[in-house]
Image (tube, rainbow, N blue to C red):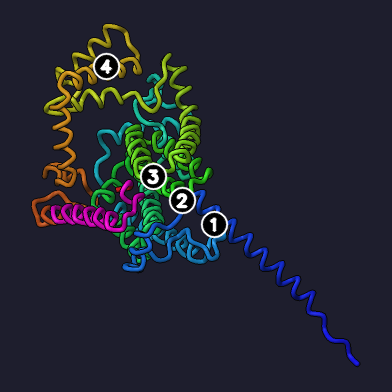
Amino acid sequence: MPRPPDFRVFRRWNAAAVRLLMIRQAHHERGRSACPERAIPAHAEQASSAHPELVEGRADETPQGHAFPSPAAHADLLLAALLAVAFTALAAALLFLLPRPAIKYDAVEYQLLAESLARGDGFRLRPDDFPTAYRPPLYPALLALAFLLFGASVDVAYGLQAALHGLTVGVVYLLGREFLARRFALGAAVLTGLSVGLTCLVGFLMTETLQTLLVAAGALALVRWERGWSWHWAAAAGLLWGLALLAKGTNAALLGLWLAALLALRWRAWRRWALGVALLGGVLVLTLLPWTVRNTLRFGQPALVSTNIGIQVYVATLDPLTFDRSDPRMMRVVNEARALGLNEAATDRLFLRYGLERLAADPWTHLARAARNALRLWELPPRDALEYLKPTVMYNDLPEYRALVWLHYLTLALALAGLALAWRRRETTLLALW
């Protein structure tokens, strides 16, 4: 007679599996209670159910909470790469098919610095000049690398500008995917690529195109860091923002405002914020350290990014504002620096001191003027400045000028719509980004 099966083994296995599932669930619940800022708030769940098309499928979501990228994340990276290639080609077509702007003003100095670096003469404008730190170093260094690889040609410089613009579009798409569905992020990226201001910047051999890319990439790293307070994203943010500072020192204000906004909006997690900021700041300082040491050895005092920060502060206090060095108010400081025998860094500190004194003497007037300038952000520049906006805009009195006005107002409307969307969804990180 056959022996009946013994089900005790199966029951033991089943009980062990149930215990493992219970342990895993308890561990998951403890993690959510220990990190309440990562839990989905009720208003976010309501927003998701009311408007699923806005929040579905973010780029960092993966099945079953695994740390490996999901197929959707791979698709987003591929689409970002395609956008970068497409808008690089578009910017290159505009630069090589339409009339180019003349290389003048600041662009001349950036080109001279890059050519000097490519020749091995150091960071100086001309071979017989002293080494300088008047301009931020990163863009001339990148341009010099392009000259070494492809030849010292203005076509190479414009090709680099087109590539930086295309990469910016791809990064903006990835940044949009942190908040919105794919079609909305795609729309934001396309609008960025077709933006009049950003497209015109491609025609300038200056640091602003590189700065825009690094600020967008730094914002993306900060968003990823805030999502889970991860150490590697804090370090990445420190590196990217350090490079952004080496592209333009004023980016320090953007970083400070962003971090302050995140602290105000996520104050319950202030310990994680403080630890992440400490790591971010450490990596940022290490990124700036080589250039700062070089300037300290050259001038006998540290200069973090460039030696024109004090001049910028002083000029901002002038009314009317002018960058003309023959202006008597500018010449007074220049002549004093020459009389004292001050070097480049010390002269900039003298400008900074006088600028801060003027600000302290009448702070409310300067604050009101700064507010007026901020409100004029979307105002079209004077007609005689349109020649500087080539190749996308021709200098004439035809309807292109009026079209620019509508494009500027459209940009303002879209920005306000983004603010309203962030407020409605209670998306704190998007509010900080705005």
- Viewer-nearest of discs 4 and 2: 2
Residue located beneath label 2 in the image: 36
Check if residue 431 falls in the magenta segment.
Answer: yes
Residue at x 54%, y 52% (from the top left corner): 31
User: Residue 353 got which mark?
Assistant: 4
Foreground mark, 1 or 4? Answer: 1
Residue named by callout 3: 266
Q: Which of marks 3 and 1 precedes in the sequence?
A: 1
Q: Determine whether, in the image, residue 253 is placed left or right of residue 223.
A: left
Identity of the amino acid at label 2? Answer: Pro
Q: Which amino acid type is shown beneath numbered disc 1? A: Glu
What residue did someone put label 1 on?
A: 29
Q: Are marks 1 and 2 in contact (CB under 8 Å)?
A: no
**Can residue 357 be seen in this snapshot?**
yes
Left/right placement of residue 96 relative to residue 411 reads: right
The mark that comes first in sequence, 1 or 4, is 1
Figure quadrant of residue 194: bottom left
Marks 4 and 3, how far apart at CA: 36 Å
Lower sequence index among marks 1 and 2: 1
The disc, 4 or 3, on the residue closer to the chain's N-terminal end is: 3
Residue at (33, 58) in percent of width and height: 189
Mark 1 element type: helix
Q: Position of residue 328 (x, y in %)?
A: 14, 17
Residue interval drawn in magenta: 405-432
Magenta-drawn stretch contains 316: no
Please tell me which residue lies in front, 252 or 118. Answer: 252
**Relative side of 200 to 277, left or right:** left
The x, y position of residue 314, in whole percent, is 22, 23
Q: What element does badge 4 sit on?
A: helix
